[in-house]
Image (tube, coloured by chain):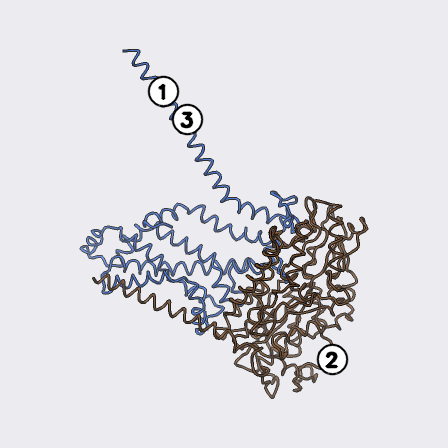
Amino acid sequence: MKKKLLALLLVAVMLVSMLAAVSCGDNTDDNGDDKNQPGVAAGMASYDVPAEGYDGSAVTITFYHTMGKTNQEVLEYYIKEFNKLYPNITVEHAPMGGYPDLRDQIKTQLTAGAQPNIAYCYPDHVALYNVTKKVIPLDNLIGSKIEVTDALGNKTILGLTDEQLADFVEGYYKEGAAFDTLGTMYTLPMSKSTEALYYNKTFFEKHGLKVPTTWDEMEQVCEAIKKIDPNCIPLGYDSEANWFITMCEQSGSPYTSLDKKNHFVFDNETNRAFVKRFNSWYKKGYITTEEIYGSYTSGLFTATEGQRCYMVIGSTGGAKYQNPPTVDGQPLFESAMATPPQLDPSNPKVISQGPSLCLFESENPQEVVASWLFMEFLTTNVEFQAAFSMETGYAPVIKSVQNNEVYKNWLSKANGYNNLTAMSVQLALSQVDAYFVSPAFNGSSMARDQVGLLLKNALVKTEDIDAAIAKLFKDAVGKCKFSVK
Amino acid sequence: MSNQATMHEKNLQKVTSSQRVMNIVVKTLLYAFLSLMALIIVFPFYWMIISSLKSVTEYRLPIPTLFPKEILWHNYIEAFSAANLDRLFLNTVYVGVVSTLLSLVITVLCAFAFARLEFKGKNALFAALLGTMMIPGELFTITNFITVNDFGWIDTYTVLIVPFLVSIFYIYLLRQNFLQIPNELYLAAKVDGTSDLKYLWKVMIPLSLPTLISITILKMMGAWNSYVWPRLVTTSEEMRLITNGLRDAFTDMSGQANVPVQMAAVAIVSFPLFMVFLFLRKYIMKGVSRSGIKG
């Protein structure tokens, strides 16, 4: 009897704790939905900058990023440079692994109020963080005219000057305002990459092929290459999600929207049509993608035997992986790069990627202002932007870097044999007017995952294509909607 | 008569030879199966080793090579320099040893109390402890994080050691083992005037040594392999453990990893654990089988 009672009691305790856990989950979802979204607030979210600006007090700020060891060496050098201007600001920086690790770390720390002061971020991350409303809107800091005097006696304003604002690459800067319809700035760009078409220049020249600038030309080139080398897959596209999103932008058809009642608008005729077109390419053996191939398609591009590809559309950040293979130190071919194909080459659209920086709330307002000064330093300092670009192969976010002599010299060494990195930065800088960004909201990350999956699954479908594609679109929208319920 | 005997002998010989054939067939099949299983187990290790010796280009070939065309030993040197492996090693060993020792003390005392001592609510308390095993540890992650953050423990050794000192599973394992030791020994010891602690030290621990060794090994392996918690509660590189270092150090900003160097680091890190298992595997098996519990 006693044991039965004990067993009943334990079952009851278990049920109560389960119900409590479920109800906790519901609350979180409610909070995560409408009211706390930046785009839904009645007015623009703002941060009250302390009237004294930075008062020179000693503060320690933390900066989370995803930099590897060599990139950190550059950062550490410039932290010392920053400290020459602001010796009382101690910057502690910490690598957090990859971007998903960084996001998960900050997400957890936000629940405990233990977030860092500054962090690398992608727009989707910021939309997620902002469910807690702890990401600082930057507009008041950017526009602040409060005077600041650094340790060298230079007087400047706390915010960005008109020259500094004009110096940002517009497409990169605008990414910081992709979070609501009011254009509230939450991030500043740090360093950027984009997508490029890598091609085997030696092969193209040998067979008199023209580098495709449109998708129609791409189809013709793939057909021609397939005739020359029937065993090859002419084109590898690394990111299915980027492909889908870029095609939406190039077609002028909807992908996602900031309208909270209808975020996921990618199920439409235009989008289904381009997916169907690429499905026919896949059937003809023209294309593969990272997910279908099982790895970055640079593996096919640099293959020395067996199946290979002659074109890759991939990140400029990974340019070094497209350097041609060598035998006895001699490159087997010459690689080259171009802007990815367009639907309308007179109005090109290429995706903008790479980290931005965001600031988090802190109990001490001086930490926030000190973090802003450091963020401003990293994003507007020409020497740092140049050094970081040369180290990472990512494009600088300010235009004036291109006038830096060291940087110019580095760019001039670009070649298609062993320095595609510099070439990729040249290309990224040459297509600055073509960048676009997608709206960021709580759920935009899911939309990106789903359209990538959709495209991958649609490419390999063989029967009843229209019905299969329609179902894939419907399922993807359904999953996106479910994720933000 | 002699004819009959010869027939019988012949029959016997037939039976024996058919048995022998059957034996050979069964053994062949058995060994073929075991060899296949062994291959399946060994293959990931083989893949790790050959990948650690390839170039990135070779690693990314559409048709993977089963042996490196060019053996790159310098991947191992690069692994050390890229990941600061020595510091990660030291941290992991320190956390592993300290947490294992403290955990052993707690486990032994708890298991002894639940196995031998009589006190009010013993069974209810033990049932409640077992009940906690039904809740996945991941559910506690956020609450534990908030707690240790409030304690100011973030980025310290304390936070890597203290939260996982008590393992109900190990207490249960050892308690089952202690229960198998006859009560008469305890009573005889009591008659001789032995204290509980002395009995525990002199009788129970020596008799349960295999289980304790397996607990030690499992705990060490747990510390060595832990990933999520150390990742969450350490913010500086000086406090990171080996698993986090392996994950962080080899991915560039575009998210692409230098897999050969990463594999070299994984091989280096797996080596001590591999040796531990190689030399102490009989204790792991014995400990688990003696307590009458499946792995």
Percent of width and height locating residue B285: 38, 47
The amino acid type of the residue labelled 2 equals: Glu
Crowding at mark 3 (Cα within 10 Å: few <14, some 14-19, many 20+): few
Cα distance between the residues tagged 1 and 3: 12 Å
- Tell me whether the residue at label 1 lies in contact with that at label 3, contact meaning CB atoms closer than 8 angstroms: no
Q: Say if labels 1 and 3 share a chain.
A: yes
Residue at disc 2, secondary structure? helix
The amino acid type of the residue labelled 1 equals: Gln
Task: Decide if residue A269 is on the left or right side of residue B95.
Answer: right
Subunit bearing disc 3: B
Determine which of the numbered discs, if any, sits on residue A199 in the image: none
Percent of width and height locating residue B283: 38, 47
Residue with the mark numbered 1 = B13
Give the answer, above or below, for where A201 lies relative to B6: below
Q: Which of B144 and A483 is in front in this view?
A: A483
In the orientation shown, which residue stands out farthest toward the top? B2
Q: Say if labels 3 and 2 share a chain.
A: no
Residue with the mark numbered 3 = B21
Residue with the mark numbered 2 = A163
Q: The blue chain is which one?
A: B
Of marks 3 and 2, the one in the foreground: 3
Q: Quadrant of residue A195?
A: bottom right
Subunit bearing disc 1: B
Tell which circle, 1 or 3, labels the residue nearer the N-terminal end.
1
Percent of width and height locating residue A311: 72, 54
- The shade of chain A is brown
